[in-house]
Image (spheres, grey):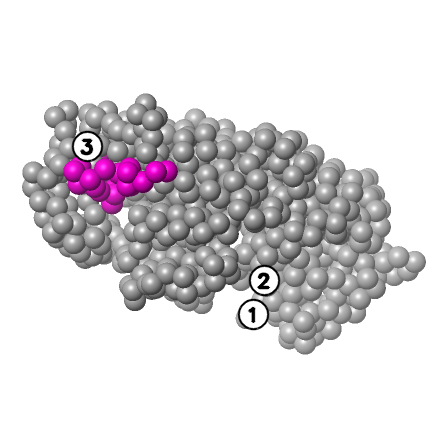
Amino acid sequence: MQLTDKIEKSFRLMEAQKKALKKLGLETLKDLLFYFPVRYSDMSEIKAIKDLSDGDVATIYGEVSGLKTKKAFKSKMPMAEGYISDGTGKIKVTWFRQAYIAKMLHDGQKVSLTGKVSDSKYGLTLQNPEFEKTNSLPIDVHNSLFAKDQNEGFHYPVYKETKGITSKWIYHTVHKIVGSGIVKNLEDYIPEEILNRYKLPKLSTALVWVHMPKNKNHSESSRKRFAFEEVFFIQLSRQKEKFENNQKKSFKIKVDEKDIKTFTDKFPFKLTKAQDKAISQIWKDFSGAHPMSRLIEGDVGSGKTAVAATATYSVIKNRPDQKDFGNLQVAYMAPTEILAGQHFEGFTKYFKHTGIQIGLLTGSTCKKFPSKVDPSGATNISKAQLLKWVANGEIPILIGTHSLIYKSVKFKHLALGIVDEQHRFGTKQRAKLANKEGFAPHFLSMTATPIPRTLALTIYGDLDLTLLDQMPEGRKPIITEIITPDKREQTYDFIKEKMAEGRQLYVICPRIDEPDPEKEFALQTKSVKAEAERLKKEIFKDKKIDILHSKMTKTEKEKVMEKFANGEVEILVATSVVEVGVNVPNATMIIIEGAERFGLSQLHQLRGRVIRSNHQAYCYIFSESKNEKSIERLKALKTAKNGFELSELDLKLRGSGDLAGMKQWGVSDLGMEAIKNLKMVEAARKEATNIVEKNLLDDLDLTKTELENRALKIHFE
Ligand code: ADP
Ligand code: MG
């Protein structure tokens, strides 16, 4: 056996198994070996039904009753459903897409069920639990590895399954691979010194322990190692990037504070302390020898655009090196045409008294401000003309979508790149924006997605962070209410009153958990359509309602958003996955359905859509939950000061497998366990920085190769 061998070469597989392995992304023996258990089951996890609560992962022993097959209500997927009782209570059990289970068990059968308890309309439910008839013990206890001392209890791995592959199959197969001895000689790609420093097991040991722990210590320390490893490699790649960035030359930017003050004094407001601080940090970066790489994190409405405008002004007031004419240039990139258009309008307001030219470049529009004919407004110009003026440096500020990094766009002296509502400038994008003279532009990223500090330290390890953690004064906070089913009617009535005054409404449909994104989008689409129909038929009969979901094309989405922005559409029913970072000041109300399925920071971000107005904004958190803990959790939305606080709460409150809102960061569930641990994150960062700064990577062959292998998979950009 070789680690690079295909699984089917070493094991006889049925067609269904081949398909399932493919779906799980498992091709080689190595893939299987690195397919870690999602958790371990333990006799100590056995609970009485009466003690269960939402979110528990538990094993219960009991008797099956009322087992039947049916079609799931919305998706029409076949499912099995029944009850289990253990003398202390009775709980509903559902197996989605596993209708066959109803045939494998019968009423009265004694079973052990292990799975996650969640709260639903029907009360607490055990969803898709693993089951065992109790006359067979959990994973082959006769098997030597699991023949435990009586008092230790069983501690066996549970793997994520899919149709065709069971957790047991994976366990047994991995067991054989490990048994063949190929793991023993595996060399470690983390330097031994580092492992010793943090008392982490070496790779060959950790692989055995993670799959076949003899006790809890084994599983915990092996998982700790792999969690550390993940953060360590992310850090290594971030620190390397930072190091490389620091080797580049950038434009020297002189900051004329007095002149800039006359610029900011013209703002129709006074900058917040947080904005002032962000601006000084940027100025400090400008004075350094290397290009700035800074990320501004701030809630929606915290005033990031004003900071961007001030940074822009500071840059363009500089002349290119050794020249006494022309300006340094700034590129400002937004994720959608609508947002780019809004930034263009915003910038023309901030800059109108300066006479500075601003260009807008998107897939469909090219504009220039000011217009020669009417200097108070912008004018449409041809793309060729715009590109020419950008290339010869006549237009110092260019705002646009991704089209800014197309080859055809050439700047004369690009000194600053700003990207809005995107997590970061990728290496590739930076390279495309680089200048002919070999100067690297400064980079400023801005995001309204609050994430916990430890996560930021990890995935933004190469960036300097600025938190805009203060809202402009006088802004009315969003009134947030948790709405239980009994208060729905009166809430709809209140919303109708506000709509009669001309306000508009967002309705966000619940998140649907489904590992297959295609299916998830399809289900989401269905629920958005159904909810829009229901609202039209039952609640808002005379209102114009439209929908927004991820199956729509970009153009379709933008069209609907435009209609919503100009009031043609009064209620927008959307999925949570559709980003709507758009300014619709009249949309002052948002309903979030099935709120218990969202993370707090995700709810907070969704709510941010209604903060743009002078009118009082309202956010209605609709929950079907009867569970007090769920409601309690949602109440943090009323008390937390800002998004950062909520993201920390998410990290603390939710199980690692449940940090769905955080999946987008490309960190695995196991890696998230490290993210919960500030010490571990700091240790990984320290070690990675040390390796990069002392230039040790070239001597660490295995580490270097592993880093390269992983870099293919990490996509933060
Ligand atoms: P963000 O991009 O952070 O969501 P914006 O920059 O779009 O926020 O600002 C939101 C609104 O707040 C804008 O209308 C802007 O004019 C206003 N604003 C920005 N800074 C301040 C401030 N210091 N005081 C009052 N209003 C501000
Ligand atoms: Mg913004």
Residue under label 2, please give it: 401
**Residue 384 placement, left or right of 101:** right
Dot 3 or dot 1, earlier in sequence: 3
Element at label 3: strand
Residue under label 1, please give it: 363
| Disc 2 to disc 3: CB gap under 8 Å | no
Image location (x, y in percent) of residue 526 = 27, 58
- 499 or 157: nearer the eye? 157
Q: Which residues are magenta?
A: 120-145
Image location (x, y in percent) of residue 132 = 21, 41
Residue under label 3, please give it: 61
Image location (x, y in percent) of residue 679 = 59, 29
Element at label 1: loop
**Residue 532 placement, left or right of 270:** left
Residue 307 shows in the view: no
Amino acid bearing label 1: Gly
